[in-house]
Structure formats: C-alpha cells, structure tokens
Image (cartoon, rainbow, N blue to C red):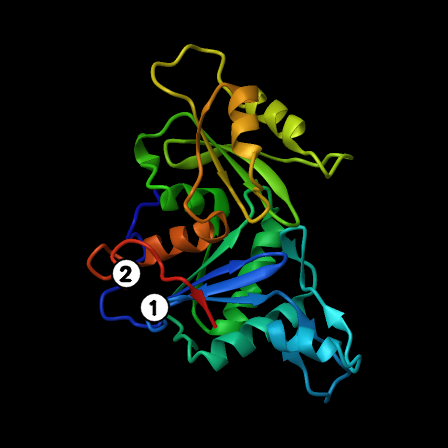
Amino acid sequence: MLTPGAYARRGLRHMLAIDLGTATVRLWSPTLGQVIEEPTVVAWGPPGSRRAVGRAALDRATHGDAPLVWPVRAGVMDNYPACVHLLRVLVTANDLVCRPHTPVLVGVPATATLRQQNLVRAAVRRATGGRVTVVEEPLAAALACRIDLARTDDVVVVDIGHGRTEVVRVACGTVTAAERVDVANAVDQVPAIAAVVRRFTPRAHRVGPRRLLITGGGAIPGVAARLAALTNRSVTMPANVRLATIQGLTMLLTTGQDHPTGSTPGPPGQ
C-alpha cells in the first residue's frame, strides 16, 4: 500500500525521486530541498565527443555541432544509453550519487509494459547506483492531492502528458484498470478521455461523490470543466499539475517531520 513515508529511511540524506517525462526530467532529494527540472534531451555526438544534457544540450544545438536525442518517447524509454547518460550527468552534477541500499523512486506510466518498467528500472539503477522502485505515476499524483488511497474505491485519474495520455481507475490503493488514450484528433482529446472515464465507472450505485483527478503537464485550462460535465464526476486538480508526480514520490520518501518544506517539495530550480 502506498502511503506517505512508505519508503522513508531516517538518517539517509541521499534518497532520490525521479519523474522521467517525455519533455522534462525532474529530480528531488532531501539534500536539495527543491526540484531540479531539465529538458529530457541529450546532445549526442559521436563516441569521444563532448556531450551535453538538458538546457546545455539545447544551447549546443544552436551551434549545430551535435544531434539532439530525446531518450523518452510517449512516456517510456526509447534510448537506453542516452537516458543513462542524461541521468548520470544530472545526478553527478547535483551530488546525488546513491549507495546500493539507498531508496530511489521513479515514476512510470500505469500502461507501461513490464519490459518497459524493467528498462527504466535498469537505467535508473545504472545511473544512480541506488535501490530502484518504480511507482505508477497516477498513484503518485493521487498522493500529492492528499487522496487517502487506502479508503478510496472510486477514483479515476486522467494523466495528460506531453507524450502519453492515460486514464486509470484506482480502488483500495491499487490500479484496477488503465487505458492509454490514442485519438486521431490530438487537438481535442477530451471526448475520447471522457468515454474511457465513463467506461471505468461502476454501474452499481455508490454513495458519495465520484472523483476525477486530472494531472499532467498537458492538462490545459478548460479541460477540468469539460470533463466534469461529460463524466458527472467531482474534479480535483493539484495546485501544480506539472509537479504532481514528483510531489507524490517525495511524499513516499519523507515523513511529515522530515519533509524539507513541511508538506510539498520546494519550487523548481536549477
């Protein structure tokens, strides 16, 4: 059962949370006290050449001396060596290299296959040196919204990412159904999302509100109101949809007393 503090280890200062997104990678550790955000990109030149990651890679691209590689596609890993290099550089630059017993949590899509999850786990372990656990991103986002997963039997999470949109039903702390939304009309996914949400809604009458959590960097203004009207659900959105996954992972690694800001990670920074 995922509950706040489930992976907390008193005395350890190099615990690490990673949100490895298609467009942006985010890292948090108690030693930082804030979220590090960088574009998920590597300036990937030939062997022996100087490579760069994140914003530095985008800067190098303006000179045209190294092709850009985006190692995550549609929410899952597409280039293992580039992903390991990206994470290793960020971890080393921020003094976040872990010991073998140090907890490292990384978010993965709920619709990722077991092979895709294992690939992420292996890359993060190689880059950080820690003990890696993958956590389904919708569950992390639900924690960030202070949803008591243990007592929840009808919450649907819509995660609208820049590379993948998925709808997930959560009951009693676990994902009971998950579906990726692929539509021809990428400009307006709302009708397709609403159709999946309705399909995930139990037919039996239930006392109390049916909750719909909307998260992800692609959750643009107006989506919440439309989905509420189309699904007849009570909609919740985190204060910052971009940071919901990393906030949930952070809560798993810390207790209320240990958390550097009391309840949520600090603002993103460099």
Q: Please state which amino acid type lies under the numbered disc 2.
A: Thr
Secondary structure of residue under mark 1: loop
Location of residue 41 by image quarter: bottom right
Residue 173 on image: x %, y %: 38, 36
In whole angstroms, how far apart are the C-alphas of marks 2 and 1? 8 Å
Give me the residue at 42% from left, 80% from top.
Answer: 95
Nearer the observer, 101 or 225: 225
All told, the count of numbered labels is 2
Nearer the observer, 223 or 1: 223
Return the residue at label 1.
33
In the rendered structure, the answer to whether residue 63 lies left or right of residue 95 reads: right
10 Å neighbourhood of mark 2: few (<14), some, or many (≥20)?
Answer: few
Give me the residue at 46% from left, 74% from top.
Answer: 129
Give me the residue at 33% from left, 53% from top.
Answer: 251
Residue 174 on image: x %, y %: 42, 36
Nearer the observer, 104 or 226: 226
Return the residue at label 2.
261
Quarter of the figure with the N terminus: top left
Residue contact at pointers 2 and 1, CB within 8 angstroms: yes
10 Å neighbourhood of mark 1: few (<14), some, or many (≥20)?
Answer: some
Location of residue 246 by image quarter: bottom left
Residue 35 on image: x %, y %: 43, 65
Reading the chain from its start, which is encountered first: label 2 or label 1?
1
In the rendered structure, the answer to whether residue 238 lies left or right of residue 222 reads: left
Residue 226 on image: x %, y %: 57, 27
